[in-house]
Image: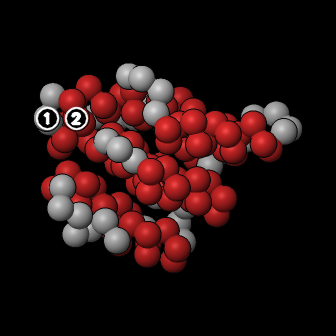
Amino acid sequence: MKPRLIMSALGALALCTGCGPSLATTAMNAMQGCIDVRNPAFVRGDGEQALAIPLPVAVDLLASRTAYKFGLRLYQQAAAEAETQAELTCALELGSRLKSDDTREWIGTFTRHPNAPVANLAKRLMNLQ
């Protein structure tokens, strides 16, 4: 998969923050790990199967380290700039780690998404909030 603008934007934020692995760096790594796992099934046209694949423990751990308001903003930005289903669904899933009204409101905007796997994921994530 070629580098995407979305990862470049998160990468630029990571470089700006300066002290050790930043929240932006962690979010960028979580996104890339999720995309690497899910994208092949999306490319085959099997979105529901892509979303059934569990994230590796390492990606899950990275995501848990980004469950802050700033992390949510990073994932919201990633979703807004997403060009693929894998990018959008990874941003939603990883961003949903923060349990908050802002997260519920954001995820709720995707429950009527025209792409069925995206809408179904949003509905599942809303139930977990």
| Closer to the camera in the image, 128 or 22 | 22
In the depicted structure, whether residue 1 falls above or below residue 9: above
Please tell me whether residue 87 is drawn above or below residue 110 in the rendered image. above
Q: Residue furthest top?
A: 1
Write down the quadrant of residue 27 in the picture: top right
Residue at 53%, 66% in the rendered image? 99
As shown in the figure, which amino acid type bears the numbered disc 2? Answer: Phe
The picture places residue 50, in percent across and down from the top left corner, at 24, 36
Kind of residue at badge 1: Gly
Q: Secondary structure at mark 1?
A: loop
Q: Position of residue 126 (x, y in %)?
A: 35, 67
Indicate the secondary structure of the residue bearing disc 2. Answer: helix
Observer able to see residue 27: no
Could you tell me which residue is drawn at 22 percent across and 35 percent down? 42
Q: Position of residue 87 (x, y in %)?
A: 38, 42
Q: Are marks 2 and 1 in contact (CB under 8 Å)?
A: yes
* Of residues 7 and 55, the one drawn nearer to the viewer in this rendering: 7
Q: Which mark is residue 85?
A: none
Closer to the camera in the image, 44 or 103: 44
- Quarter of image, res 22: top right
Residue beneath the point at 21% across and 30% down: 43
Mark 1 Cα shell of 10 Å, populated few (<14), some (14-19), many (≥20): few
Q: Quadrant of the C terminus?
A: bottom left
Label 2 sits on residue: 42
Q: Which residue is mark 1?
A: 45
**Residue farthest along the front direction in this orientation:** 5
Residue beneath the point at 31% across and 65% down: 110
- For disc 2, the neighbor class at 10 Å (few under 14, some 14 to 19, many from 20) is some
